[in-house]
Amino acid sequence: MKLNKTLLFISLLLLLVSGVFSPASSQKLTSGNPVLKGRYADPEGIILNNEYWIFPTYSAKYEDQIYFDAFSSKDLVSWKKHPKIVDTSAIKWAKKAMWAPCIVQKGKKYFLFFSANDIQTPDRSSWNPKTDREDQIGGIGIGVADKPEGPYKDYLGKPLIGKVFNKAQPIDQFVFKDKDNQYYIIYGGWGHCNIGKLNKDFTALTSLEDGKQVKEITPKGYVEGPVMFLRNGKYYLMWSEGNWTDETYKVAYAIADTPFGPFDKKETILVADPAVATGAGHHSVINIPNTDEWYIVYHRRPIPNVDRDHREVCIDKMYFNKDGSIKNVKMTFEGVSRKTLK
């Protein structure tokens, strides 16, 4: 009898160690980094319907970037994949290079902004139809759905922004809702950043005071990947610098009193760490409602980095100093602790 009890105890112990049987106390306590399985980049982290969501770029050759996956979580630790929430079969004008999705919940609809086709046309202000090639179809488009996980259909049937203004390639869009409920779109590659006002139904841009559609707000060092948020009445603009294909990629920020700036660069806060990863950038931020708790959701390159498209999505905490400046972000392998939303 004593032998049987001993064998039973050993069997239970082995089950606990193997994870087949695990009490609540042995559940995964941190997210780990990367938080998503597979190659992804340019993550949009957001809270929707009391859940955490990540909408990333599928990191692959441009010709293979023809769809978006999404991921949801109730606690920042366990993530559920929602595959192919939209693809080029729904967005007929998109052929490749679907990048950097960002999402807005407005009323009962979800609007997924994205860029596609990596258009290379000249600045519209200097484009000459007699000497320059015809404009390519591409730029920033919008999908619309009844649920965050889609399926999304083409909202406009064409790009919202399909031309190059102020030398800013129409990619890497971020949609920011101001305290007066005005929505702004901030975007741009090729080292230039524009801001424009969206009309109420997101079908077009509203002309600014000078009659133009967009205004350039490029800070020093800007390359791509803008993000804007409000904290204590101040407008924070964050962006990526360096080359997205290597270890020089990093995140910087500026602070201003209006969404139009001026944005004078303060410093970089997320850079390569040879002990953890390189090429960290193209991020977003999540603020837990009614708190001053912040997370940075970003992609980075593992060590060793296999190739150009070897990028992974990670989450770490983001902290502020008393003067409102952002502390340097410490990249980790542990990720973040479990955090449910009330």
Image (cartoon, rainbow, N blue to C red):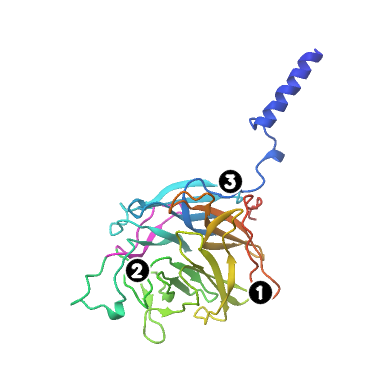
In the rendered image, the residue lying farthest to the bottom is 210
Pick the residue in front: 194 or 231: 194
Q: How far is the residue under mark 2 from the one under mark 1?
A: 35 Å
Badge 3 element:
loop
Q: How far is the residue under mark 2 from the one under mark 3?
A: 35 Å
Magenta range? 137-157
Which residue occupies 69% across, 39% down?
26
Q: Is residue 34 above or below residue 187?
A: above
Pick the residue in front: 278 or 202: 278
Single out the mark in the foreground, 3 or 1: 1
Tag 3: amino acid: Ser
Asked if residue 49 can be seen in this view, the reply is: no
Q: Residue 165 has which mark?
A: none
Tag 1: amino acid: Gly
Q: How many numbered markers are drawn?
A: 3
Q: Is residue 1 above or below residue 202?
A: above
Which residue occupies 33% across, 73% down?
164
**Residue matched to label 2:** 160
Instruction: Judge from the rendering whether residue 199 lies leftward or rightward of residue 132; answer left or right.
Output: right
Q: Which image quarter holds the N terminus? A: top right
List x then y, in percent, for residue 237.
53, 73
Q: Which image quarter holds the C terminus? A: bottom right
Instruction: Judge from the rendering whether residue 267 lies leftward or rightward of residue 166; answer left or right.
Output: right
Asked if marks 2 and 1 touch (Cβ < 8 Å), the reply is no
List x then y, in percent, for residue 61.
37, 52
Give the mark, 2 or 1, whose residue is nearer the N terminus.
2
**Residue matched to label 3:** 78
Asked if residue 69 can be seen in this view, the reply is: yes
**Residue matched to label 1:** 324
In the rendered image, the residue lying farthest to the top is 1
Membership of 94 in magenta stretch: no
